[in-house]
Amino acid sequence: MSTTQPAGVDATTKEQRLKAYLERNAADGELYFKSKFIADEVGLSPKEIGALMHKLADSAGDLEIEPWSYTSATTWRVAPA
């Protein structure tokens, strides 16, 4: 018998973890970051963060999320909505 979770459950957990991090760190104003610099803090790879950021930009109504700049990697801007 396998104890692995379905892929959707893991993806939701990752998305929730990233969203919680963004909400905490952008609570007092804007947050600018590159995925590679927060990867260890949220326990995700920079590639996973980038994919989730695009998803959150469309679905997180309480956060303003936008790709702000691109210099060797995307810099994201996050602010409370």
Image (cartoon, rainbow, N blue to C red):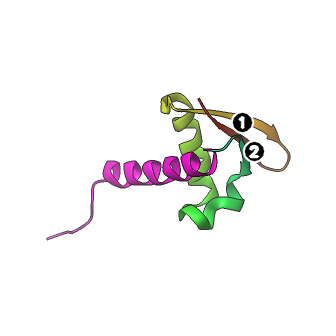
State the predominant SS element of the stretch in magenta: helix
- Provide the residue designation for mark 1: 67
User: Hey, what amino acid is under mark 2?
Assistant: Thr
Labelled pair 1, 2 in contact (Cβ < 8 Å): yes
- As helix, strand or loop, the secondary structure at mark 1 comes to strand
Figure quadrant of the N terminus: bottom left
Instruction: Please indicate whether residue 5 sits to the left or right of residue 36 in the image.
Output: left
* 5 drawn magenta: yes
Q: For the magenta stretch, what is the residue range?
A: 1-27
The residue sitting at the right extreme is: 71
* 48 drawn magenta: no
51 or 60, nearer to the observer: 60
Figure quadrant of the C terminus: top right
- Provide the residue designation for mark 2: 74
Disc 1 packing (10 Å; few <14; some 14–19; many ≥20): some
Instruction: Please indicate whether residue 72 sits to the left or right of residue 54 in the image.
Output: right
